[in-house]
Amino acid sequence: MKISITGVAGFIGSNLCTALLARGHSVVGIDNMSQGEYENIAAFKAHPKFKLHKIDVRDEEAIIKVTTGSDVIVHLAAFKIPRYNDALDTLLINAKGAENVAKAATKHKAKVVAASTSDVYGKNKDLPFSEDSNLVIGAPDVKRWAYAISKMFDEQLFFGYHERHGIDVVLLRFFGGYGPNQNLTWWGGPQSVFIERALENEEIPLHGDGQQTRSFTYISDHVDGIIRTIEMPEANNLVFNIGNTYEITIENLAKLIWRLVRGEDDVPKIKIIPYETFGKYEDVMRRIPDITRARELLGFEPKVDLVEGLRKTIAWQIERRKLVGK
Ligand SMILES: NC(=O)c1ccc[n+]([C@@H]2O[C@H](COP(=O)([O-])OP(=O)(O)OC[C@H]3O[C@@H](n4cnc5c(N)ncnc54)[C@H](O)[C@@H]3O)[C@@H](O)[C@H]2O)c1
């Protein structure tokens, strides 16, 4: 197949592209390099079945042009964390990017596989989250919700295009991805920052009291889930949770990473950062996916446990740091 990927130089995009090229697909990569890294695409940049276009997903004409002939458009480009800039960028980049991808898919009669997020479940306390669970969002002056709301809008937008224009769409709610090519700041998730701090022998910052939980998914499992939804028509026009069901508190994640980096006997250095530091803020206190739908319809099963995945990620992060002289 000919597959376009927006956000190809990012964490998920670059790993997905590697796997798709290995399966014989052709890939048209799109990225504006705002968060992507050339290092992430170095291994396949010269592959005869890969082409990179440095364009912005907000550029409708360019997106329609470069995706011509695509069987599938995988839409991953997004602005993820409002506090890295502002709520408006989050809302508008994610809304306009999704609209342009939907228009391109309609024009080329392509299927869309688009990234949503576990954050859409928000403050719902009814665990684990299944795809039909309620999406419970907080007040509009808490800027973190801009991200979840932009992805909820995207989900509705793609289903709207399916309804009106008949294109096939798949929406993927990813849970806590980690692994090689992850961004080394909070943009890449807490595990990136915790590994950095442990390698530097510096305090690991915990937001709130560290008792909030997350489910972390190794990148090869995310990629496996995405490929199943690209290749299997059974996935069409559905939402899927793609994640690992193992739940861990952020404090225990910090302690585990410290031990894996610095050895069993080293006492973890941890620093509490009160939520008030972020202004008006609300956290999600527990987050676990119900993956029954992906399991039953697609045969999806996460295979890499947290310790094994973190060991691989730490080894990769040490190598990536060397490239920037650390
Ligand atoms: N990583 C996770 O665990 C996770 C969890 C939930 C949802 N997601 C979603 O999955 C997708 C991929 O996430 P990721 O972790 O790989 O993020 P990432 O930031 O590593 O990759 C996104 C890529 O998109 C590019 N991009 C951003 N804005 C763009 C624009 N306007 N035009 C063109 N390119 C642009 C960035 O340069 C980057 O390379 C995102 O939509 C994200 O919301 C990821």
Image (cartoon, rainbow, N blue to C red):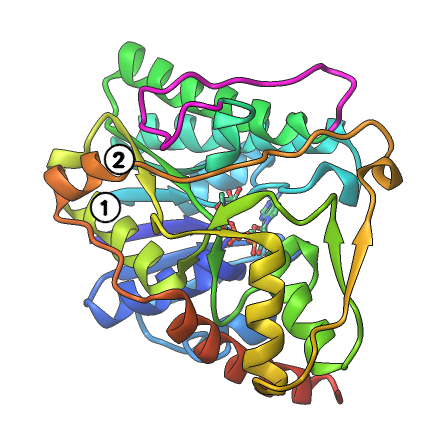
Amino acid residing under circle 1:
Ile
The C terminus lies in quadrant:
bottom right
**Are circles 2 and 1 on residues that touch, CB within 8 Å?**
yes
Q: Position of residue 189 (x, y in %)?
A: 60, 55
> Does 196 appear above or below 79?
below
Q: What is the C-alpha distance between the residues marked 2 and 1? A: 8 Å
Q: Position of residue 15 (x, y in %)?
A: 40, 65
At x 63% / y 85%, what residue is drawn?
262
- The reply to whether residue 92 is visible in this rendering is no
Front residue of 316 and 274: 274
Q: Is residue 304 magenta?
A: no
> Does 242 appear above or below 158?
below
At x 78% / y 40%, what residue is drawn?
83
At x 23% / y 46%, what residue is drawn?
230
Callout 2 secondary element: strand
Query: Mark 2 highlights which residue?
Result: 111
Disc on the earlier residue, 2 or 1: 2
2 or 1: mark nearer the eye: 1
Q: Is residue 127 magenta?
A: yes
Query: Mark 1 highlights which residue?
Result: 230
Q: Which residues are magenta?
A: 125-143
